[in-house]
Amino acid sequence: MSKPDELLVDIAAKVESGQSNQMSLTVVTGGAVLTGRLAPEAVWRQRVTEVLTDSANLGEFADVFAKPSAQAGPPTHLHFHVARIIQGTMAIPETGGMYRVPIDDVSAWTVGDVSYSDH
């Protein structure tokens, strides 16, 4: 999107202000369909930090995510927790992952978590 969708920015701001990770959203970005729950950036960063800290090979990157965001103003990114990329009849990863998506890159979206068929 050349100009971010104001409604989507408002949803992201509401998630940020409420420190909640219960808002389910599905977006199309870069031709991919991503579905899951939004999380405040601080919560998302904390979870990524925990995962990296526990990794034998990636622990050195944990401090990058541990820093607080320096962003002021309206949100510029969506932070997905327990999210999946829908690809045909599959969801990748099945257990959900952590994704950061620039709001400017969202070409379509809907409220709710889109389910997929594993048959």
Image (tube, rainbow, N blue to C red):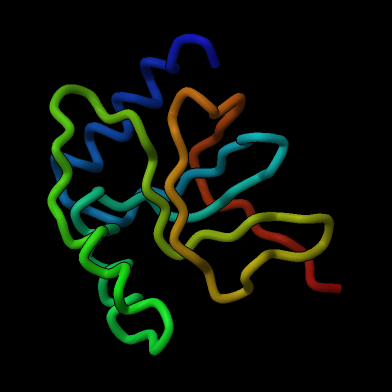
> Is residue 45 left or right of 18 when viewed as pictured?
right
Residue 115 to residue 57: above or below: above
Relative vertical location of residue 100 with respect to residue 75 in this rendering, above or below = below
Q: Residue furthest right?
A: 119
* Front one among 55 and 5: 55
Determine which quarter of the picture holds residue 106: top right
Question: Which residue is located at x 59 percent, y 60 percent?
Answer: 84
The C terminus lies in quadrant: bottom right
As drawn, 118 above or below 116: below
At x 55%, y 43%, the residue is 26
Instruction: Classify the position of the N terminus by image quarter.
Output: top right
Question: Which residue is situated farthest in the top direction here?
Answer: 3
Position of residue 57 measured from the top left corner of the image (x, y, whole percent): 43, 83
Percent x, y of residue 35: 56, 51
Residue 78 seen anywhere in this rendered image of the structure:
yes
Give the mark count: 0
Q: Is residue 51 visible?
A: no
Say which residue appears at 77% left-offset and 55% top-offset.
87
Please tell me which residue is depicted at 25% across the width and 49% down the height of the picture. Answer: 41
User: Can you give x and y, in whole percent of width and height, for residue 112 in the image?
Assistant: 51, 46
Q: Is residue 59 left or right of residue 91?
A: left
Relative to residue 10, is residue 51 depicted above or below?
A: below
Quadrant for residue 15, please give it: top left
